[in-house]
Amino acid sequence: MKFLIASDIHGSAYWAERLSAAIDVEQPDRIILLGDQLYHGPRNDLPRDYNPKRVIALLSGWAQDGTLLAVRGNCDAEVDQMVLPFPCMADSATVLDDAGRQLFCTHGHVFGPGLHGGIDRVPALPQSSALVYGHTHVKVNEASPAHEGLWLFNPGSVSIPKDGTHSYGIYDNSKPLEQAFSHVVLSEE
């Protein structure tokens, strides 16, 4: 089972199109969006080719086969649910892979591991679970230093990275948890 995990598109049609091309190549079983899909927010500069209407069309296309799962980010609003054909207003979603491993997916502003200036609020999760989050725009792929048995994964930001590279993540449950997540850097054309 292969998941493509992305966060913080922030209305960038350019980077959403790069991600769309990656989806075509990766052919994931599921697409997980960790929030901040359409708007840049008051603290961020406008991303390249800021065009939320174009991003709506791309996201809607990704959702057509029912494999897309999305959670709400701090820049997402109720009006987003009015223009997107998939649920996107929950603060979190739990995904079980076909091996029964639990991935707690959230944006990172309500629940998070306390890294890179983010909130430190982790829900009770079973051993060998993963906290999958965005929000900080910084890639993470490591065991939690504060919560034994919990893996942390942040795919970074598709459009406004704070660590230098635009990115998304891949989860492959055929591998052990320590190797199941990886980052993929999006290139500019």
Image (spheres, helix red, strand yellow):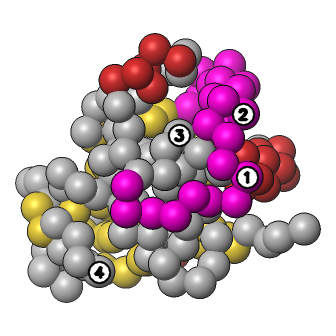
The residue that disc 2 covers is 54
Whichever of callouts 4 and 2 sits on the residue coming sooner in the sequence is 2
Q: Front-most of 118 and 146?
A: 118
| Tag 4: amino acid | His
| Tag 3: amino acid | Leu
Q: What element carries label 2?
A: helix
Residue 77 rendering spot, x and y as whole percentages: 35, 31
The residue that disc 3 covers is 38
Q: In which quarter of the image is the C terminus?
A: bottom right
What distance separates the C-alpha of mark 3 from that of mark 4?
Answer: 23 Å
Whichever of callouts 1 and 3 sits on the residue coming sooner in the sequence is 3
Q: Which segment is the magenta one? A: 42-68
What distance separates the C-alpha of mark 1 from that of mark 3?
Answer: 12 Å
The residue that disc 4 covers is 116
Residue 56 magenta: yes
Q: In this view, does 49 lie to the left or right of 44?
A: right
Whichever of callouts 4 and 1 sits on the residue coming sooner in the sequence is 1
Q: Are marks 4 and 1 in contact (CB under 8 Å)?
A: no
What distance separates the C-alpha of mark 4 from that of mark 1?
Answer: 27 Å
Q: Is residue 6 left or right of residue 111?
A: right
Give the number of callouts. 4
Q: In this view, does 119 lie above or below 98?
A: below
Q: What element carries label 1?
A: loop
Q: Do the residues labelled 2 and 1 touch (CB within 8 Å)?
A: yes
Crowdedness of circle 2 by 10 Å Cα count: few (<14), some, many (20+)? Answer: some
Crowdedness of circle 4 by 10 Å Cα count: few (<14), some, many (20+)? Answer: few
Residue 53 rendering spot, x and y as whole percentages: 66, 30
The residue that disc 1 covers is 49
